[in-house]
Image: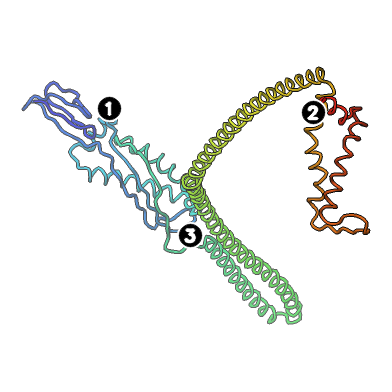
Amino acid sequence: MFHTCGPNEAMVVSGCGRSPPLMISGGRVFVLPCIQQIQRISLNTLTLNVKSDKVYTRHGVPISVTGIAQVKIQGQNKEMLATACQMFMGKSEAEISQIALETLEGHQRAIIAHLTVEEIYQDRKKFSEQVFKVASSDLVNMGIGVVSYTLKDVHDDQDYLNSLGKARTAQVQRDARIGEAQYKRDAVIREAHATQEKVSAQYVNEIEMAKAQRDYELKKAAYDMEVNTKKAESEMAYQLQVAKTKQRIEEEKMQVKVVERTQQITLQEQEIARKEKELEAKVKKPAEAERYRLEKLAEAERLQLIMEAEAEAESIRMKGEAEAFAMEAKGRAEAEQMAKKAEAFKQYKEGAMVDMLLEKLPLMAEEITKPLSAAQKVTMVSSGGSEVGAAKLTGEVLDIMTRLPLTVEKLTGVNISQVSSTRMG
């Protein structure tokens, strides 16, 4: 018949054909019914609450110590498994735990007795390592391995941990009381001796009493000084220890404040990062989108202005070309007209010039009369021997016109009247 077990269990097969017994942890095995026997042992990790109440330390201070240990039977080590099977086969986990607990507690008590309260309280790691080392070496002989050991709690009923200097203070006070008792005893002895000597020899006794009194005062002063010194040292040691304890408490408080401040700074940095992301999502992104839109609008407007400017430039260029072509055509027409006029002048000479002058006479008359037409009021004064009124003004204009042929003759050398008569004749 096949039997199986999990990784937290071991099987021991004994009987016919199994010498020594077969031990299997986490597997399966075939067992012959009736002639072979199978037994199981647990390999689970056992948690032990190792508590030692009121154990006296090296200085005689009773303290209570609680430790947490994790132990288990080592199934991978065949020798340790065989030893555990020999010692614990058929026992329950509770019984195995009790045996291991008592062993650990004994070692824990032994180590506490060799250490001071200060060494245990201030260096818990060292204490845990010592218990682990000593207990491991002992439990290995039982097939049990110590997985871990941790010091959980240290306390006392004498309030020693809250005032580590009280033990020293009590010792100093005890020494002071012993010194005082010894002093009183010596004083009584000296007093009795002095009384005895007084009976036998009064004078000598007085001298001795004086000496004794002197010695007494000197020794008393020395004892008082020593007692006061011890008291002062005790008080200073107590105050120093209290100051050190307060300093450690303040340092711990400062460490807590530093950790809290560090956490606050971390939270503030995370909040700043969140607000920056929120600002980027709510402000920067829309602003960038708006800027992109405005840039595109500005680019489109710039391109539109460029195209309009190019169109306007093209229009101006074409208009300029048209005007240039018109001016060129006009110039050619005027040039042709001037050429024809020059040809006419060349052919008709004085006659052509006279025709041109006659064409311009009305314009000249218009220019002469322009000042008069622009005048708003004309005041005419007569000397009594000539015409007056509008006839006088018209006559003066005509008089100016009759002088034009003479002026033209002086300017051009052409006599308009003569040429006109010749052409008419």
Question: Above or below — where is 193 with respect to 312?
Answer: below
The quarter holding residue 82 reads top left
Amino acid at pointer 2: Asp
From mark 1 to mark 3, how far is it between C-alphas? 46 Å
Residue 315: x and y in percent read 60, 30
Residue with the mark numbered 3: 161
From mark 1 to mark 2, how far is it between C-alphas? 153 Å
Q: Closest to the observer: 214 or 162?
A: 162
Residue with the mark numbered 1: 78
* Numbered-mark total: 3
Quadrant in which the N terminus is drawn: top left
The quarter holding residue 213 reads bottom right
**Residue at the image position 82 percent from the left and 52 percent from the top:** 391
Label 1: how many Cα within 10 Å (few below 14, some 14–19, many 20+) = some
Label 3: how many Cα within 10 Å (few below 14, some 14–19, many 20+) = some
User: What secondary structure is found at the residue carrying circle 2?
Assistant: helix
User: Seen in the image, is 181 located left or right of residue 391?
Assistant: left
Question: Above or below — where is 132 with respect to 29?
Answer: below
User: What secondary structure is found at the residue carrying circle 1?
Assistant: helix
Amino acid at pointer 3: Leu
From mark 3 to mark 2, how far is it between C-alphas? 146 Å
